[in-house]
Amino acid sequence: MSIIYDNRSRIALRVRQLMTGKHFTQTPQSNLRRLISNIELMDEQPDDGDIAVASNRPDLSSRACATTQLWAARNEYRLRHVDGELRMAHKKVILVNNDKAIYTLSFLV
Amino acid sequence: MIGKLYGGASTALTRDYGNGRTEIDLRPEFRKRDAPMSWFGTSEERLPDYTARMKAAYGDTAAREIMIDGTPHVMIFPNLFIAEIQMFVIQPLGVDDSVQHVTALQFKGAPDLNRRLRQQTMGSVGPAGFLLADDSEMYERCHRGVLARNPEWIFLGRGEKRQRQDELGFTVGHVTDEVPSRGIWSHYSQADGAGLMLSREQPPP
């Protein structure tokens, strides 16, 4: 079971939820600082022409009435050339603490 | 769709079974819709294997009733919650700190239904759930409200004047009323070792 398992349509639904102004965990909105590092082009590449990339990221989040939280994860991406642009086809976020109880994760990680 | 179920015009009910067991009963609204699997935001046509197995197991009439009524939304004292498509066990760590353990319901021999149960569970609950993230936020805001000593009282009287007994003698109220809160706290206040005093008097003006 995933904490988030979204296709493009469900991601759009999350954005719509935020835009209603009634998404209480984001009222007020979190202050976020995202960092991405250790970007690697993976040795093993998929057969279908997509590009496999990974990175590490710590995000710092401060929500009203919550202590500043550090969310650390490894990201795995599939990137794809579409009409001359590099687009994201797949993103998997593996939180370092995904085997433990975690607090509300209300920003789009 | 979910807004209407919990809105002012809804015919859905809250129910107190006693012993701290309470539920939200959405069947009146689902029966008005009269569409099998509408409770789950889907249809018989989209779940043909599950539908066929239900009819084989229960006969057409009973299967149709079950598939219209849907699954329970019930809290079993002290910490079990059957939440239609998923189950929670709430593990208290302190008065203001608890872990919600949750998993999707899965039925034997229903892989098509189970797939949707997992998808909808992941979408609705958990730390990033469409429903539960905001629910948890409201629980935490209630914690902060409870800590405030001014005003001194917490009022759980919503719907007291319009609650009634159902055909089995259980107390029921409107889906937005606080019948379940009153039921849980009444039971808790009588439990052995409960360090809680509830007052039935009017709060000070």
Image (tube, coloured by chain):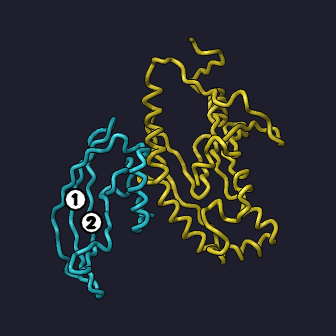
Chain colours: A cyan, B yellow
In the picture, measured across the screen, residue B188 lies left or right of residue A83, that is right
What is the total number of numbered labels drawn onto the structure image? 2
Question: Looking at numbered disc 1 in the image, what kind of residue is underneath it?
Answer: Arg
Q: Which residue is mark 1?
A: A57
State the residue in front, B194 or A29.
A29
In x, y percent, where is residue A78? 28, 75
Residue B191 seen anywhere in this rendered image of the structure: no
Tell me the number on the disc at residue A75. 2
Q: Residues within 10 Å of mark 1 (few under 14, many from 20)?
A: some
Quarter containing the N terminus of chain B:
bottom right
Q: Could you give the CA–CA distance between mark 2 and mark 1, rounded to whole angstroms? A: 7 Å
Q: Verify CB contact (< 8 Å) between mark 2 and mark 1.
A: yes
Provide the secondary structure element on which disc 1 rests: strand
Asked whether the residues under marks 2 and 1 belong to the same chain, the reply is yes
In x, y percent, where is residue A109? 31, 57
Q: Residues within 10 Å of mark 2 (few under 14, many from 20)?
A: some
User: Residue at (70%, 65%) from the top-left corner?
Assistant: B36
- Where, by quadrant of the figure, is residue B85 drawn? bottom right
Q: Is residue A70 above or below residue B40?
A: above
Question: Looking at numbered disc 2 in the image, what kind of residue is underneath it?
Answer: Asn
User: Residue at (63%, 40%) from the top-left corner?
Assistant: B8
In the picture, measured across the screen, residue A35 lies left or right of residue B43, that is left
The disc numbered 2 marks a residue on which chain?
A
The disc numbered 1 marks a residue on which chain?
A
In x, y percent, where is residue B118? 52, 65
User: Residue at (42%, 64%) from the top-left corner?
Assistant: A5
- Where, by quadrant of the figure, is residue B170 drawn? top right
Residue B177 seen anywhere in this rendered image of the structure: yes
Q: Is residue B171 above or below residue B72?
A: above
